[in-house]
Image (cartoon, grey):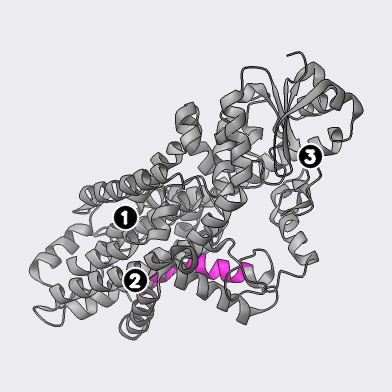
Amino acid sequence: MTTTAPERTGTRAGTRAEARAGAGRRVPGSVPVFLLGCAVGTIASIWTVRAGTNLDYGDAMAHLTIARRILDGQTPGLQQLGTVWLPLPHLLLMPLVQDMYLFRTGIAACILGTLCLGISATALHRIMVRLGLGRTARVVGLGVLLANPSLLYAYTTALTEPVLIAAILACIAGLSGWAFSGRRLSGGELAVFAGIPAACAVLTRYEGWALVASGAIYVGFVVVRRGDGLRRALVMAAAFASAPLAAIGWWLSYNAAWYGNPVEFLTGPYSAAAFTEVFVEQGQLTTKGNLGLSFKVFGWAAVESIGLLPLIAAGIGLVLMTWRWGIDNRALTIWLAGTSSAFLLFSLTTGQHIMVNDVSLPSGAYNNRYVLSAAPWAALLCAYLAHEVGRRKALAGAGVVLATVAALTAQNLWWAGDPGERMTVIEEAHLGQRNFTDVKKMARWLHDHYDGGNLLIDESADKLAVAPVIAIDFDQVYNRAAGDAFDDALADPESHVRWVVMHRTQVTTYATKAALDLVTTALADDPAFLAGYELVYEIADLGVYRRIGG
């Protein structure tokens, strides 16, 4: 079977012309859709920055901090990327966070997120055009993506979702452009337009690694169906995978060079394994080995983050697509968008990831934002459903748009009634805001009263990743990222620092054992330290100390 372009039967002449144009490299409407995505992202950013909610997630502040450390600090350099998270989001934020105002307010993340939203919307649009979906369907797909408040919130923060979703959609857009092109594109073109975005996904989150596998399989299927044979399929799959595999090789080499272990990110003290160890010891990793509970937890996160009505429409679209398209190239393109969902479900079941919500054991709100990577899949399926409904009757297109507006409005009104309970991504942000209230008060006090001198703080300790709120130059700060300089300051603080921030008693609740406050361990009961420093501010179990005599 040879597939060079998607079927477009039953579409209107204008739509057919647009679809044929989409078979080339240029896709009509890409620039307006990009500007629309950026406009929506800008409005969302203004809202969250004014409300001060874009820094509610502790991880968001940590990402900003890591990005700034690369060029500013006691020991700047690529080693500051660490191994907790993959490096690309930090590298993209790096030039923006060097401006203290953009760093302190989190606007640096808003700028990156807004651009990512524009890219995400554009890539989604290009995929839908390649699939031959009509104008009405494309409006529906973009509406599902751009009218999602949880997703818009995430795009105003320094969380990894904006870069991940943009990279995934850009990769699928590149693959669909290759698969449905009016001419046979070379392996080099495939590597550039699909492989490089896949490499970006690989260096953002581990869902990107799964996308490399599913994308390579997709390429193989398309080539074989063209009648080009297995050997050609392997060559083209290798061309697609070359850039992301090189990215994986770089990451392994980075870990080996700086930590002596190429899989430090898997086994080290700051790895996911170390993170889940605490939950295992407390009996809270209940999804491990339990596919049913994993699916239930994942499903509930999707309902609260993507919406019940869009998911129902997506489910109907999936059934209808499978019935009408089977597993042809168009259907496989849409299935590609489900890769991250399959990976997340696998990670929950194998205990590599933890997610907590109303149906988990125990319940709570934690890590549900990961399910936002399923939003593009839902958007594509909703768009397909709209395409099938809209092409049946002359006036159905307007009806589909009105029904979509009504459904999305109803969904958002429901969420708005109690966002802290009905939207688990926002619920976790609210929890972060409450958990960091005292820490941020301390950080603001220090920012307002800081009058020079070095600062000793263990930012890796529980809830002390508040560098954007303290907002002083990093070359004045001694923390774990400073390496030996941090150890020297712990051993002799009076010779190194004027200010010290620490928990006055050691933390007893933490996400990993590495979250213990090393400054507390070294100095809290040290008579020489207590004689040389005075406690100038205290709140909860936190204390700010200043050297006596200046």
Residue found at the very far right of the displayed protein: 527
Element carrying mark 3: loop
The N terminus sits in image quarter: bottom left
Residue 257 picture location, percent across and down: 72, 37
Disc ID at residue 121: 1
Q: Which residue is mark 3?
A: 504
Find out whether residue 400 is within the magenta segment. no
Circle 3 or circle 2, nearest the eye? 3
Q: Is residue 228 visible?
A: no
Count of numbered labels shown in the rendering = 3
Q: CA distance from mark 1 to mark 2?
A: 20 Å
Element carrying mark 2: helix
Q: Earlier in the sequence, mark 3 or mark 1?
A: 1
Q: CA distance from mark 3 to mark 1?
A: 48 Å
Q: CA distance from mark 3 to mark 2?
A: 46 Å
Q: Earlier in the sequence, mark 1 or mark 2?
A: 1
Identity of the residue drawn at 59% across and 39% down: 441
> Looking at numbered disc 1 in the image, what kind of residue is underneath it?
Ala
Residue 448 vertical placement versus 10 (above, below): above
> Looking at numbered disc 3 in the image, what kind of residue is underneath it?
Arg
Identity of the residue drawn at 33% across and 68% down: 413
Q: Earlier in the sequence, mark 3 or mark 2?
A: 2
The C terminus sits in image quarter: top right
Disc ID at residue 411: 2
Circle 1 or circle 2, nearest the eye? 2
Identity of the residue drawn at 14% across and 66% down: 15
> Magenta region: which residues?
330-347
Residue 395 vertical placement versus 339 (above, below): below
Q: Nearer the viewer, residue 73 or 209?
A: 73
Question: Dot 3, how many residues are within 10 Å of its Cα: few (below 14), some (14-19), or many (20+)?
Answer: many
Our reading of the magenta stretch's main secondary structure is: helix
Q: Looking at the image, do the residues carrying marks 1 and 2 touch, with CB atoms under 8 Å apart? A: no
